[in-house]
């Protein structure tokens, strides 16, 4: 079923921006409602302009990779639309090669690479446990940059 709050936000946005002709995906950050709320708030505050995903999960689920220029509606922990973003860059790198610049752009914690590595190593290890794939420094990470276009 389509997310009604996302459709409402998208309709408002495209009415104000009739040049936008493509569609959108609606999704939330993180593994639980509190994390989704926290990360969505960082987007709205313009502190979070990047995200990282476990690439192997895209392969295992045949999910399409994000593409530059795509629009997304960010949902909060209650699956309510709170923001519209547009992807500006997509890169695939080994976990050990994620840069301090990317960690800072994710906007989480103290925004250092050390914090990013600690949090994401735990998160990716837990995700991979369900697939029986090991986590290593060579585990591929999908890095996405985006810009905030609209929010409530």
Image (tube, helix red, strand yellow):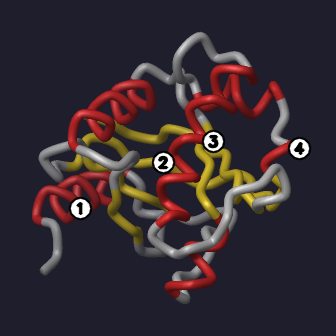
- Marks 1/2: CA distance? 15 Å
Q: In what element is the residue under mark 4?
A: helix
Q: Which residue is mark 4?
A: 97
Along the polypeptide, which appears first: circle 2 or circle 3?
Answer: 2
Q: Is residue 37 above or below residue 6?
A: above
Q: Nearer the viewer, residue 130 or 67?
A: 130
Q: CA distance from mark 3 to mark 4?
A: 13 Å
Between the C-alphas of marks 4 and 2, the distance is 25 Å
Q: Which residue is mark 2?
A: 85
Q: Residue at x 16, y 58 (%)?
A: 8
User: In this rendering, which labeled residue sits more in front, label 4 or label 2?
Assistant: 4
Proximity of marks 3 and 1: CB atoms separated by less than 8 Å:
no
Query: Which residue is most to the bottom?
Result: 62
Instruction: Indicate the secondary structure of the residue bearing disc 1.
Output: helix
Horizontal side, residue 99 vs residue 89: left or right: right
Circle nearer the viewer, 2 or 3: 3
Q: Residue 82's quadrant in the figure?
A: top left
């Amino acid at each position: 079923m389509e997310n009604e709050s996302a459709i409402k936000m998208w309709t408002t946005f495209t009415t104000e921006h009739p040049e936008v002709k493509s569609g959108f995906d609606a999704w939330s950050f993180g593994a639980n409602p509190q994390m989704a709320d926290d990360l969505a708030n960082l987007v709205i505050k313009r502190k979070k302009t990047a995200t990282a995903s476990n690439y192997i999960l895209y392969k295992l689920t045949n999910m399409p990779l994000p593409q530059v220029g795509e629009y997304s509606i960010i949902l909060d922990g209650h699956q309510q639309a709170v923001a519209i973003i547009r992807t500006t860059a997509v890169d695939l790198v080994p976990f050990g090669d994620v840069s301090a610049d990317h960690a800072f752009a994710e906007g989480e914690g103290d925004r250092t690479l050390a914090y990013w590595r600690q949090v994401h190593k735990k998160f990716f290890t837990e995700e991979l446990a369900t697939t029986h794939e090991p986590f290593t420094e060579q585990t591929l990470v999908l890095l996405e940059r985006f810009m905030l276009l609209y929010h409530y």
